[in-house]
Amino acid sequence: MTRFPHRHLLGIEGLSAGEISLVLDLADSYVEQSRSRERKSQLLDGRTVVNLFFENSTRTLTSFELAAKRLGADVINMAVQSSSVKKGETLIDTAMTLNAMHLDALVVRHAESGAVKLLSDKVNCAVLNAGDGHHEHPTQALLDALAIRRRLGRLEGLVVAICGDILHSRVARSNIHLLNAMGAHVRVVAPPTLLPSAIERLGVEVHHTMKSGLKDADIVMMLRLQSERMSGQYVPSIREYFYFFGLDYEKLAVAKPNALIMHPGPMNRGVEIDSEVADDFKRSMILDQVELGVAVRMAVLDLLTRPAREGRAA
Amino acid sequence: MTSPAAPAAAPASPARVAYVNARLLDPATGLDAPGALLTEGTRIADLGPRLFADGVPEGATVVDLGGHCLAPGLVDIRVQVGEPGEEHKETIKSASRAAAAGGVTALVVLPNTDPVIDDVAGLEFVARRAREVRLVKVFAYAAATRGTEGKEITEMGLLARAGAVAFTDGTKPVTDPLTMRRALSYAGAFGKLVVQHPLEPRLASGVMNAGELATRLGLPGVSREAEIIMIERDLRLAEMSGGHIHFAHVTTGESVDVIRRAKARGLKVTCDTAPHYFALTETDVGDYRTFAKVSPPLRGEMDRRAVVEGLADGTIDVIASDHWPQDADHKRLPFAQAAYGVIGLETLLPLTLELAHKGRMTLLDALARVTCRPADLLGLPGGRLAKGGPADLLAFDSDVPWTVDVSRFKSKSKNSAFEDRPVQGRVLRTIVDGRTVWQAEA
């Protein structure tokens, strides 16, 4: 497969293993480019990429900005205040306005599930979902997959335990879809209050203890727990949560001896992950994830702008 | 309260009209036979298979229905209008036009307007606007609690005297059990029922059916239990208070089961559902389709089937359109932010007929759910072909196929969940008090 047959990247759900591999293979080449002295190319010379963020983000925004710039694109970052009650109205209005400016790619983050899809219906350029509500965060799952593949050489057959606030996590959903498509065994580990209903229907094994969930796992993927969800709404307290679900060496002991640790960041040290584990350079892939994020986003920007660059109809 | 009997500028009811060559359908009596019907002024003067055997009476206008159906006009007991307060979404006039085009000759509006209809003046306003429009019969619920705030019961006696057909907080559930108990017992003393929107709000903070699809879409779900629990609670309160509880739009199999058992025990309980709950499922939400965002949410296929079953066995008494107009700005939003509601006045007939076309119910049984049953439930005139009764009639072609095209609808809002759906059965003529208020283009 050499062609990515989708106009937008709104989610991982619906992508085939071949399409995912296409992105990862291309991303591999961009890792090399980023590490070389000639890290900037002219591929997207004269093209315009807008990062439209309705939700605060430093990491993802920086990563997308860097990716577009390394490909030579003109990049504009727009942070839209989404605090107003009528934020949805500005969504369509903003989309129409931007569309009139002839963009080549629009990278969107929004606090509402489905907002990026809604916006993609109103514009002519490629749209990349940089995270929508609790729905999907496809480039995060792709960079996670790339990190695993580069370390272990494959995804198929691996046991991946995704731990923590699955209920509110777009990262978890995208990873579940991707890992299943690539033939990994996915487990989710969380207290029942942090699991969405019928999560097992997404093809995952459900565990409520770290002991059973991490047993013989190749990869332990930790999720961030928002502080406002820790005081009695979903879990009784931070200390209780860390006691049962925080990742430390003791809980990690049941996983495979060289099991790798991932976290999409930003981490809550002492809440979902112990500092020692997070900083264990042999086990933790947290910094790999950050590096590979740029390469994956370069690959996606490349693939989604190809039809326009090659003069084909998008 | 609002029978448009008062003199008005619109053309008066013609003296005598003879509807001949009709298939007479009266769900109340089980009549299904070729025949004719004569209206005199606002009343049905006579009907039957052998009527006019000796010729049509002199001076009567003759309408040849070409063998098509003549039934009581539809009675829709759950309609939201935007008047007063949100006239850009729907006025009593636009809702009346939509009703007439949909074969609905009587409708009951919810009190969720701005201001809320919770006093006599509010009812009189609706009645006055309906008289001015003078198309279909417009009745009104009054709020069960002041401002639909769920705290203090309204002046139910005075409201009943002023024409309130029943009490409900409409799109809002009465959540406080003590308030509900009092509303049920107090309304019961005036012979009125209380209509509940059965959702326990603490369990219903989501925006679509809880389950796999909501999880995939990353949307918070409304569990089926949120509805079932409220129904179970209110059945206890109804039993305790002796009042009559009516549940609007039931959507789950267990809701139907619970109500079926309560009826068997002799409780004063009735319920309705809306076409979207027997014709659509949560998969119609698909890729964040806000036009399929309703409250309670569309459920799964097993529940849809259970609702059809409940209709077929009579547990569900009534089909109401649950017409809730919304303008595009309130629907073209991310799913969780979009407004609830679909319009339904102009699709009520074909979607109800679908139950008969699919063999789930007889034609008469299906029609009963939108004619005599709702009329009897709320004590409204019409809903049957009765000698001396009001000439509120609907002529329709039961089989003609067509495709729903919302752009042709009379409703001011276009938020139908049925756009492009192939349906069967079309209104040919809508008659209110003997007067044709809508007629299909030839």
Image (cartoon, coloured by chain):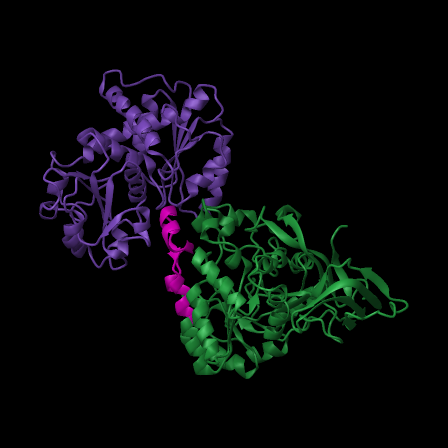
Chain colours: A purple, B green
Residue B193 point in image, percent of width and height: 54, 76
What residue lies at 49% left-to-right and 26% top-to-bottom?
A102
* Residue range (magenta): B202-231
Residue A231 point in image, percent of width and height: 24, 57
- Residue B377 figure quarter: bottom right
What residue lies at 47% left-to-right and 56% top-to-bottom?
B298
**Foreground pick, B119 / B379:** B379
**Foreground pick, B92 / B114:** B92
Vertical order, A29 against B234 (above or below) = above
- Residue A78 figure quarter: top left
Residue B152 point in image, percent of width and height: 47, 75
Q: Is residue A1 left or right of residue B123?
A: left
**Where is the N terminus of chain B found, in terms of image quarters?**
bottom right
Residue B327 point in image, percent of width and height: 57, 50
Q: Is residue B187 left or right of residue A226?
A: right
The residue positioned farthest toward the right in the image shown: B58
Q: Is residue B439 left or right of residue A28?
A: right
Residue A126 colored in magenta in the image: no
Vertical order, A156 against B171 (above or below) = above
- Asked if one can make out residue B176 in the rendered structure from this viewpoint, the answer is no
**Foreground pick, B128 / B208:** B208
